[in-house]
Image (cartoon, rainbow, N blue to C red):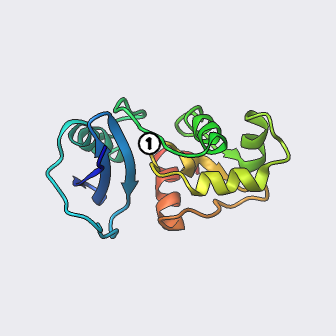
Amino acid sequence: MEVRFSVIETGWGRFLVGWIPAGIVSLHFPGHRPRRAVSPPKGPARELGRELDGYLAGERRSFSVPLVLRGTPFQLRVWGALLSIPYGMTVTYGELAARIGNPRATRAVGRAVGANPIPILVPCHRVVPQGGGIGGFGPGPHWKERLLRLEGAI
């Protein structure tokens, strides 16, 4: 099925969402330029617009819009574990590796976290380094810090 792209206007800027009728497949932060034509948000993209705007305004703590995650079995396990991290909480990469039953896979977990195609909804921003600080984040550390502050995690 072909992925459609739509722009979602929020109080934090214009997010680009990739979607199919079954659910959301990707989310890109403001400043990301689409490589394909953009269509008006419909179905799950429209619903995500409402939910994301509420979350970024501090009025929503979870999402109900369906997600369509595509990745390796290992990535899917890591992303599933990300979904279990509660709002406002953080875990380390090592803790996440232990949660999926592979405590020695910290670096592989870090790569899988970095490959997450649906940040915020699959809350990779809630994973921090063991030694302190907030760590990396694909869209930029300022976005990660902003999300963690929104949730009261820092």
Label 1: few (<14), some (14–19) or many (≥20) C-alpha neighbours in 10 Å? many
The x, y position of residue 6, in whole percent, is 22, 54
What residue lies at 63% left-to-right and 52% top-to-bottom?
112
What residue lies at 78% left-to-right and 51% top-to-bottom?
106
Q: Is residue 95 above or below residue 112?
A: above
**Pick the front one: 119 or 67:** 67
Which part of the image, by quadrant, shows the N terminus? top left
What residue lies at 29% left-to-right and 41% top-to-bottom?
20
Task: Please identify the quarter of the rendering in which residue 86 is found.
Answer: top right
Left or right placement of residue 77 versus residue 98 in this view:
left
The x, y position of residue 91, in whole percent, is 68, 43
The x, y position of residue 105, in whole percent, is 80, 48
The x, y position of residue 19, in whole percent, is 30, 45
> Residue at the left extreme?
40
Left or right placement of residue 84 versus residue 67 in this view:
right
What residue lies at 29% left-to-right and 68% top-to-bottom?
35
Q: Secondary structure at mark 1?
A: loop
Residue pointed to by mark 1? 121
> Residue at the front extreme?
1
Left or right placement of residue 14 versus residue 133 in this view:
left
* Amino acid marked by disc 1: Leu
